[in-house]
Amino acid sequence: MLDLSGWPLGMRVILRKERPHPGAQLRFTDADGNRLTAFATNTSRGQLADLELRHRRRARAEDRIRAAKPPG
């Protein structure tokens, strides 16, 4: 069980378990062939699918910014 008592009020953790598509490279964290992803949010409204989509889009944007920066 995850203890959120030290977190701000209204925080919740969304956990998703899915099978990677055929041919996907498995990660060392993929348990029993399933991929687990999680994110924390304080958004109290909205469908879970919409919240997860927003999270994934933001992560992709941050990856693009990181890739565009010069190394070093």
Image (cartoon, grey):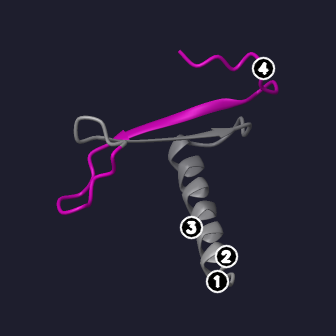
Q: Residue furthest right?
A: 8
Query: Helix or strand or loop: what does disc 3 sit on?
Result: helix
Query: Answer yes or no: do the residues labelled 1 and 2 have beta carbons within 8 Å?
Result: yes
Please name the amino acid that badge 2 sits on.
Answer: Ile
Disc 2 vs disc 3: which is toward the camera? Answer: 2
Q: Find residue 12 and report its horizontal and vertical position in percent.
A: 65, 29
Please name the amino acid that badge 3 sits on.
Answer: Arg
Q: Earlier in the sequence, mark 2 or mark 3?
A: 3
Residue that carries the numbered disc 3 in the rendered image: 60
Tell me the magenta residue range: 1-28
Query: Answer yes or no: do the residues labelled 1 and 3 have beta carbons within 8 Å?
Result: no
- The numbered mark at residue 65 is 2
Q: Nearer the viewer, residue 64 or 43?
A: 64
Give how far apart the Cα atoms at labels 2 and 3 are.
9 Å
Query: Helix or strand or loop: what does disc 2 sit on?
Result: helix
Residue that carries the numbered disc 1 in the rendered image: 68
What residue is rendered at 50% in x and 47% in y? 49
The quarter in which the C terminus is drawn is: bottom right
Disc 1 vs disc 3: which is toward the camera? Answer: 1
On the image, which quarter does residue 32 sit in? Answer: top left
Q: Nearer the viewer, residue 44 or 68?
A: 68
Q: Earlier in the sequence, mark 4 or mark 3?
A: 4
What residue is rendered at 81% in x and 24% in y? 9
Give how far apart the Cα atoms at labels 1 and 3 are.
12 Å
Q: Find residue 22 and report its horizontal and vertical position in percent.
A: 17, 59
> Is residue 56 found left or right of 10 in the rendered image?
left
